[in-house]
Amino acid sequence: MKLIISFYLILSFNLMNAQSIEEIELKLINSLEDVHFEKDDKLAMKMNDEFKSNLQKALLNKEIFNYPFDSLSKFMSTVISSDGEFRIFNWNIELDNQKQHYECWILKKNLNIIKLSDFKKEIPEIEYSSLDENTWLGALYYDIIPNQRKNKTVYTLIGWDGNNMFSNKKIIESMVFNKKNKVQFGEPIFKYSDGKTKKRVIFQYNKQSYMSLKHKQVRKEDYIIFDHLMPPSPHLKDFNDWYVTDLSFDAFLWSENQWNFKRNFDAKSLKVLNRPFNDPNK
């Protein structure tokens, strides 16, 4: 059995190397398009398995890590961390009632692959919970920020979640690689003025609204700058599906090994944000 598996892997590797990287990209695009256009949820998930099989074979090609994937990135996220340690292959499938299913594969620079599982169960106190690759809070990431914290690198991931037919979410996630080369989500690095420290930050807002959430370097300092959200009327304060932006901004500033919250951040005077902001999946 081991010999058969080894033979299959060698054969797949040779076949993928016989294809140009452009041909591999086109095959992935066509396969993922089939997933996105399929309206039947069960068939879409079956096609997704076929896409993952194609992606698995594609990742045998040593050129994959540094290839730009300009065309494929229009259909999924293929972001590389700025320190060059890893890149992600991250995509979503829209199901009934605009519910989302997410997939994310982390490709290390040594070509090892870590596959995340979209955890569908509700997690109590999600902003304070530690998660791993099997309990991943699914999202579509569009930015990766590496920062040094003590003797390790902490990665801050900025992402979007289509959530449901009423609201979207934006997520600021924290991630580290442990000594066993596994991922852990939920470093306590988001510090608020009331003394609370979160492991991730989740914003929920109305589907008809928008929310800008961006990483910017201003005068050699790292900021995550975002629209302030509020209910359109006081009696809706407990219903995040209705939250909208109020044209003011808040921010996190990286200092003292953590992200420190800054309310009413003067983003306009620094001219660090350009409107309008489009969700990364559009």
Image (cartoon, rainbow, N blue to C red):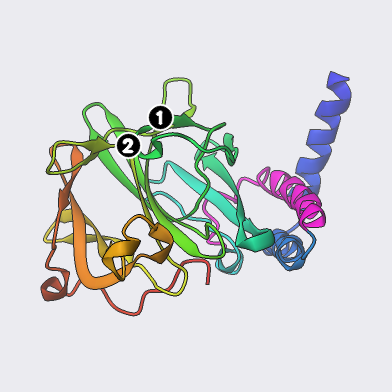
Other-residue count near label 1 (Cα within 10 Å), few / some / many at <14 / 14–19 / ≥20: some
Rendered residue at 60%/38% (across/down): 117
Disc 1 marks a residue whose amino acid type is: Ser
Helix, strand or loop at mark 2 = loop
Q: Would residue 47 be counted in the magenta stretch?
A: yes
Query: Residue 199, which numbered label?
Result: 2
Q: Which one is earlier in the sequence, the residue at label 2 or at label 1?
A: 1
Residue 98 in the image: above or below residue 261? below
> Which span is picked out in magenta?
41-69
Name the spot of residue 153 as percent of width and height, x first: 31, 35
Q: Is residue 72 left or right of residue 200?
A: right
- The quadrant in which the N terminus is found is top right
Q: Give the quadrant of residue 195.
A: top left
The numbered mark at residue 130 is 1
**Which amino acid lies under the numbered mark 2 shown in the image of this protein?**
Lys
Front one among 119 and 258: 119
Task: Say which of 49 and 14 sits in front.
Answer: 49
Q: Residue at x 79, y 35 (%)?
A: 10
* Residue 101 x/y as whole percent: 62, 51
Q: Secondary structure at mark 1?
A: loop
Give the prevailing secondary structure in the magenta stretch.
helix
* Disc 2 crowd, CA 10 A, few/some/many (<14, 14-19, 20+): many
